[in-house]
Amino acid sequence: AKGHYTEGADARDEIFDMIRLQFEAADRPEGLQVFMGTGGGTGSGLGTLLISSFRENFPANMLVSYSVFPSKTYSDIVVEPYNTTLTVHQLVENTDFTVCFDNQALIEQAKRNSGLLKPSFEEMNKPLVASLSGISSSMRFPGTLNTNLRKVSVNMIPFPRIHFFSMSVAPTAIETSLGPTSPNDLVKTLFDSKNCLCSMNNKHGRYYTAATFFRGNISQYEAEMAVQQLQTRNSSYFVEWIPGSITVSYSKQPVNGNQTSAVLMGSSSAIQDIFKRVAEQFTAMFRRKAFLHSYTGEGMDEMEFTEAE
């Protein structure tokens, strides 16, 4: 509430002027990428305020959000379900697409990669950084089948409101230690639920579309064949009414420390796992009007919660 209506509103103009200056200095700006958490007051409140302001001022440019959702297990803010639900309502209306991460998946993957019971924030951020680097690699480096944010949006979104994507990265730290990874192994790792950077189970839904981003010394033909074979073998996990639903981008520029690597951005109905978990927590609290005074006291109306729900 403070981030969106009171303290955030006071800082909005100053922050947005910085964004505007960057856009005016650019020759051909494609869009804005926003990195935010959905559970805290700053990310959810001020973040969505800036997103709505950008959409209003730059309607023709792409607006992409990389949003970290809270974890039920590793939670330290009691009103996270409220903040997240209010944020998702804004992301549905104002972003071209949103890439979802969550703290639980990041922590579990950091544990596996580092072998530590309590991994550091640096360890947690490694797969997240690798995924963001992979998405933008074909925009930053020369290569075949290059893409940009708008192409990703066109290829990935069958219906405007279905624009929440999952991410996974290959190879894992263990696979990296074994040497170069083949395209087949990379693709297998990408579509394994335990390597997804948000807590969802691929078996709980079906893929509408997906985009793969390969980097390094990889045969383009082998990469395309690996993707095609996986989709053929697992056809029940892909909707049948979108043919050729997995796109492939390729850059020869390798990631530091990896001769071959890949990133998957997927649009799957299994993403509902995240939203169901948050919705259950939201309903349990909102039914009792718990902590609602913290929001109404800052000028919010109860109807905003009803609409977001």
Image (spheres, grey):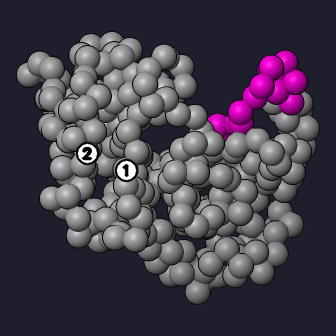
The reply to whether discs 1 and 2 touch (Cβ–Cβ < 8 Å) is: yes
Q: In this view, does 232 lie to the left or right of 200?
A: left
Q: Residue 274 carries which label?
A: none
Note whether 163 is above or below 168 in the view shown: below
Quadrant (top left/top right/bottom left/bottom right) for the C terminus: bottom right
Amino acid identity at mark 2:
Val
Q: Which mark is residue 246?
A: 1
Q: Which of 157 and 275 is in front in this view?
A: 157
Q: What element carries label 2?
A: helix
Which residues are drawn in magenta?
Answer: 20-37
Note whether 103 is above or below 288 in the view shown: above
Q: Residues within 10 Å of mark 1 (few under 14, many from 20)?
A: many
The quadrant in which residue 122 appears is top left
Q: Residue beneath label 2, please?
A: 227
Note whether 76 is above or below 190 in the view shown: below
Q: Earlier in the sequence, mark 1 or mark 2?
A: 2
| 258 within the magenta span | no
The reply to whether residue 225 is in sight is yes
Residue farthest left in this picture? 178
